[in-house]
Amino acid sequence: NNSFFLMLFISCTDNEVDENKDIKEEVVISEEVDDSIYHIYIDADWDTEVGSSESIEMGINTALLESNYQLDGKKVKIIRVNHKANPNIHLHNLKNTIMKDDKTLVVYSGLHSPPLFKNLNFINENNILTLDAWAAGGGITRSGPPNWIFRLSVDDKYAGRIMFDYGIEKKEIEKFAICAVDDEWGRWNVENIINRSKELKLETPKIYWLPLNMSLLDAKVILRDIGNEDIDGIIMIAHPSEAISVVRAMVEIEDEYKLPIISHWSVTGSNFTSCITASKDNEKYFDIAKVDLSFIQPAFIFNKNNSIVNQEIINNVKKLYPEINEYDDIQPPAGFVNAYDLTLILIEASKQAKLTGNVEIDKIRIHEALENLKNPVTGLIKTYDIPFSKYSKDNYDAHEALNVNDFMMAKFNEYGKVVEIEGN
C-alpha cells in the first residue's frame, strides 16, 4: 500500500548550517520505479516531534488514498525532509533539496512555527507552494504579496483571545500569568493576549518568559514565583519540551502553588503526549490527572460510536497503517485531521486547475485555484466553501481556512486521549 512513497531523510549535525559542509543523507526508496509526475515534501521535525510529523503525514496519505495518489489524474509521491525544528536547516532544505527537485509541487510544514517565520520571504519570493497543517504563528500566512503559504490549523490571531476568554468565562480566572517562550511565536501570542485584556479593561497579565529547553527545577521556580503573586490562572505558550517541564512541575509542586493551566495546542505534540501515555515506571511519565490542564485545538474530535464517516476514514487508514485499529490510535489526532482536510482541498484545487504536468505552470495554477475554489469540500472539521481567497494587506485572513468559530477547548483524559470539555 505504500508503493508510491519515497522517504528521504536529511539531517544536519550542527544547529547553524554551513552549506559547504557535508549533509548526511539516508534514502529509502520503494521497489517500484518512481513514475510520479509530482513530489510532495513534508519538511518537518522528524527527530523530537516524529509522532506529530507522522500524524500529519498520515492525514495526507489517507486523503491521497481516496484519489489513488493522484492530483488531477497525475501520480504523486510523498518525501520526508527533516528540518529538526531549526530554521537554518529548513532554509538549507528549501535551497538544496526542495528547489533543486524539478518534481516539487507542494511542501507541507510541521508543528513548529519558527522555521516558517524566519523563511517567509524566501518561500514567497521563490513561489514555494506551502501548506501548513499545524504551525500556528499568526504572521505565517500574513506577509506579501506574493503569499504562497496556506494554513488549515489553529491561528494565533484568535488563539490568545479564545484561551483568555475561556479562562474568564469557564475557569473564573480574574488575574492571569502568561508563561511564554521568548521567540517570535511566543511574543506574537503574548501581544494578542495583552491586547485582549485591554479590550476587556482587565488587569494586564504578568509575563514570565520561559527559557528554551528549560529544566524542571527552573519551571518549579517560576511556578512558585507565580504562586506567591495574586494570580489564579496561567496561560501557557510553550513548545512541547518547555510545556513538559511546566506541566510536570505543576504535577509535582506543593499544593499551595497549584493553578489551572490553559495551554496552546503544542501540548498535543507527540513529545508531550509520550510522557502522559508512558508506563508508570517510565522516568518520562507524569500523571496528567494531577494537573488542571486545558488547551485550544481545531473543533473536531473523532467519535467512533456514531459516525459512519469517521469509521470509513479509519478503514482507509488501516489499509496504509495496519497498526491503527481505531481512532484513538491516531496520535496526535489534530495533526491528522488538519492535514486530511487540507489535502482534500489540495485535491479539489488540482482538479479545478487542470494540471499540465509542468510543475512551474501547475504550481501557479493550484495557487490560483486555492484562492478561487468553486466547489465546496467536505472535510472533518467542516465543509469548506471558498476556504481561501486572494491575499492582500486589506484581506488579512485570506490564507486561513479556519476562523474563530472553528476552534474549541479540550483536555486529556486519564489515558492521555484528547476529549472535549463538558459544557465547552
Image: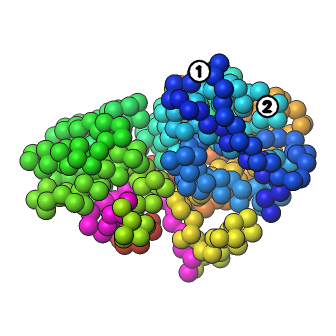
Is 286 a magenta residue? yes
User: On screen, 360 above or below 380?
Assistant: above
Instruction: Give the quarter of the figure containing the C terminus.
Output: bottom left
- Where does label 2 land, which residue? 101
Viewer-nearest residue: 128 or 276: 276
For label 2, count other residues whose C-alpha is less than 10 Å away and answer few (under 14), some (14-19) or many (20+): few
In the rendered image of this protein, does residue 147 appear above or below residue 72?
above
Front residue of 50/236: it is 50
Q: Give, as a three-letter code, the residue at label 2.
A: Asp
292 relative to 148, above or below: below
Give whichever of discs 2 and 1 has the lower sequence position.
Answer: 1
Q: Which residue is mark 1?
A: 18
Q: Is residue 162 left or right of residue 57?
A: left
Q: Residue 109: x and y, percent?
A: 60, 41
Write the residue at 88% across / 32% down. Answer: 358
Give the camera-side residue of 287 and 56.
287
Q: Is residue 389 magenta?
A: no
Tell me the tag on residue 65: none
Q: Marks 2 and 1, how far apart in space? A: 21 Å
Residue 383 visible from this viewpoint: no
Q: Quadrant of the N terminus?
A: bottom right
| Amino acid type, label 1 | Asp
Q: Residue at x 57, y 65 (%)?
A: 330
Could you say which quadrant of the image residue 296 lies in? Answer: bottom left
For the magenta stretch, what is the residue range? Answer: 284-305
